[in-house]
Amino acid sequence: MRPLPAGRGREPLAGLRRAGLVALSHVGSATDVARFERTIRRHTDAPMVLTRHRPVGFRAADWSIQPPLALSGNRVLAFAGIVNPAAFVRSLGELGVEVDRTQAFRDHHRYTPTDLAELAETVHRHGLNGLVTTEKDLIRIVTDPALTAALSGVPLAALAIELELLSGDDVLDNALDRLLG
């Protein structure tokens, strides 16, 4: 039986038996939410909340936030070390960003100065406006001076997202009351 979600540090679906609450994320991009819910219900009757990631703008290297259309019309190289880079790239397109090139890395990739220097070189070679990544990757890069130096001044931003609760407000409120009360 495969772990849910797939990836390192995950456990089998049978682990859902211990769940007090189940949050199903990325519902906006899931193709068959009902199928996932049926699979989960075979293992637990814990209350469920449905969420999605909603783009809210762009984060600069200094962690300031820019509005959602701040990079609209810019030609960029999008890169990420996440499980589903296609959803990330799709979100950029929805905000009017022209993704000219992409580079996918393994989930939880540990960036090296060589990785960032190659990305910066691609930006220069193709006349792009900069690099866009995820907040998870941005924080890894901006906290390492060797990585930021390897960018050679190429602009770097991250797609800023919020978790939007689609259903289960009362379920989440009750769980938090139990936990904090």
Image: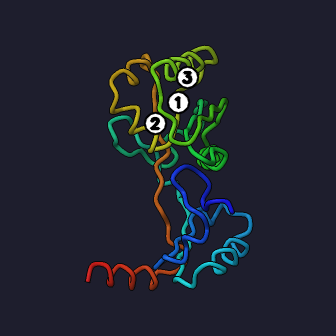
Residue tagged by mark 1?
131
Element on which disc 1 rests? strand
Residue tagged by mark 2?
157
Q: CA distance from mark 2 to mark 1?
A: 6 Å
Say whether marks 1 and 3 touch (CB < 8 Å).
yes
The residue at 51%/81% (across/down) is 168
Q: Quadrant of the C terminus?
A: bottom left
Vertical arrangement, residue 48 with respect to residue 99, above or below? below
Q: How is the image coloured?
A: rainbow
Q: Amino acid at mark 3?
A: Leu
Q: Reading the chain from its start, which is encountered first: label 2 or label 1?
A: 1
Q: Is residue 180 left or right of residue 109?
A: left
Element on which disc 3 rests? helix
Where is residue 8? Give x, y as percent. Answer: 54, 49
Q: Reading the chain from its start, which is encountered first: label 3 or label 2?
A: 3
Where is residue 112? Give x, y as percent. Answer: 46, 24
Q: Quadrant of the N terminus?
A: bottom right
Q: CA distance from mark 1 to mark 3?
A: 8 Å
Q: Amino acid at mark 2?
A: Ala
The residue at 46%/31% (across/down) is 156
**Mark 3 closeness class: few <14, some 14–19, many ≥20 residues within 10 Å:** many
Nearest to viewer (mark 3 / mark 2): 3
